[in-house]
Image (tube, rainbow, N blue to C red):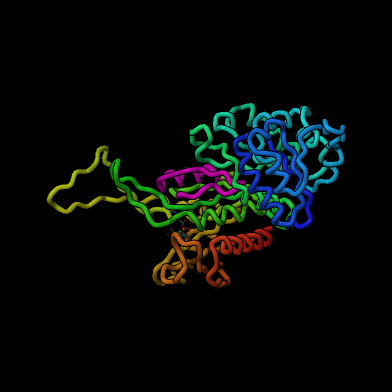
Amino acid sequence: MLKGKHIILGITGSIAAYKSAVLCRLLVSAGAEVKVVMTPLAKQFITPLTMATLSKNPILVDFFNPENGEWNSHVSLGEWADCYLIAPATANTMAKMASGVADNLLLTTYLSARCKVAIAPAMDLDMYRHASTQRNMTQLRADGVHIIEPQSGELASGLVGKGRMAEPQDIVREVEAMFDEKKKSLQGKHFLVTAGATIEPIDPVRFISNHSSGKMGYAVAEALAQRGAKVSLVSGRTALGVPVGVERIDVLSAEQMYEACCRLWAEVDGAIMCAAVADYTPAVVADQKIKKGEDDMSIALKRTHDIAATLGENKGSRLLVGFAMETENEMANAESKLQRKNMDFIVLNSLRQEGAGFRGDTNVVSLIDSESRVDLPLMSKREVADRIVDKMESVLVEKN
Ligand code: PMT
């Protein structure tokens, strides 16, 4: 996708600039020609020599070369580029971009660029969530800048939260997607995806849960986002990072997942219910740790809401895709869920199939609707996600 593409890599003064070296290398390996523009402060974080070596081009920092007066033309740079990627983009640079300040070569190049522009913000969590940063991001989006969402995690300050620059491979994937127009087939659509396991507390120490890692649901969320859809991922407990371009809403219990999904249902064009949701939850949650006694004990359980069935009751023209995790009578159980929950199609996976189901990176699924069944071979969860999204696209076409 990036072969022969001209990419300007803009680097600003952030500790995340160390990742720009890997990013540059990945872009060059993907066949792109890369020219690097740095702000003066960026040179304090990564050396021009490193970036010149990796990009195979001299680094541009100043408006002219003080040695010989040679002019670094931001206008011709802007004309040369197919994409201007600023990674990392600091809060300061984003503010200047949003208001048209042009006090360094990186910014004048931005104002001259006629190409696609993407930025990968990097900053501390409080700076990121500050109203002025959020306002600048809104402005930049309105100006057509593609924002590669920062990730949550440990930040250079030692604090934990959102603000860490996206990983280089994820940034490359987003840049590739920007060039792949046909993959933007779901632009303008908004989907709800559920993923992971719910946690039903018994007491402050113990809970009931299941083996879902979230991998299948996260793969679906990523596949949808890569085709341009807005994705709200309602996620139970997982150890996974948020896929690029996806908004994650963290929940723990089935009740919390139910509330989040019902809230979002009014806004979305459809939902893909991949989470393994508890069907029962303790009727009473003990305030204190339950002490063991001599006798056996039992815990009274009550039913949780069936989230998919609730959405299905009020489906309208929306798309509803479910999963069925079975251990016996697979087809019959899946077909019954398809009908009972008013789904457009259901994705059946069985624990009897090797390579299918919980935790692994692969799955073996059948896509079942009221008229047909397609059995897919063993493939990665990411490939399965693409096949699910392909089918969603055909159903959407039929619905319109
Ligand atoms: O997360 P991984 O480790 O990658 O594993 C993936 C997976 C096995 C969890 C996934 O592929 C899968 O099968 N998810 C659905 C698991 C499940 O709970 O299936 P079910 O047959 O019990 O439920 C049927 C459908 O109703 C599902 O879409 C489920 O999300 C939904 N449901 C179930 C119960 C409930 N209370 N509310 C629901 O919405």
Q: Quadrant of ligand 1?
A: bottom left
Q: Which residues are magenta?
A: 239-265
* x and y, in percent, of residue 281 in the image: 34, 49
| Image coords of residue 147 (percent x, y) | 67, 41
Image quadrant where residue 354 sits: bottom left
Query: Residue extending furthest left?
Result: 294
In this picture, residue 156 sits left or right of residue 80: left
- Closer to the camera in the image, 8 or 284: 8
The residue nearer to you, when weighing 229 against 258, is 229
Q: Residue at x 45, y 48 (%)?
A: 236
Q: Is residue 19 magenta?
A: no
Q: Nearer the viewer, residue 94 or 292?
A: 94
Horizontal side of residue 17 vs 113, given as left or right:
left
Q: Which of the 4 quarters of the picture holds residue 19?
A: top right
Quadrant of image for the C terminus: bottom right
| Place of residue 290 in the rendered image (x, y in percent of width and height, measured from the top left) | 22, 43
Q: Does residue 64 show up?
A: no
* Rendered position, 295 above or below 88: below
x, y (%) of residue 86?
A: 70, 40
Direction front: furthest residue = 67
Q: Quadrant of the N terminus?
A: bottom right
307 up-or-down from 88: above or below? below
At 57% from the left and 31% from the top, the residue drawn is 129
Counting every numbered tag in the picture gives: 0
Q: Nearer the viewer, residue 106 or 346?
A: 106
Examine the structure image and report whether residue 251 is included in the region drawn in magenta. yes
In the image, is 154 to the left or to the right of 47? left
Residue 133 visible in the snapshot: yes
Residue for point 78% across, 36% down: 110
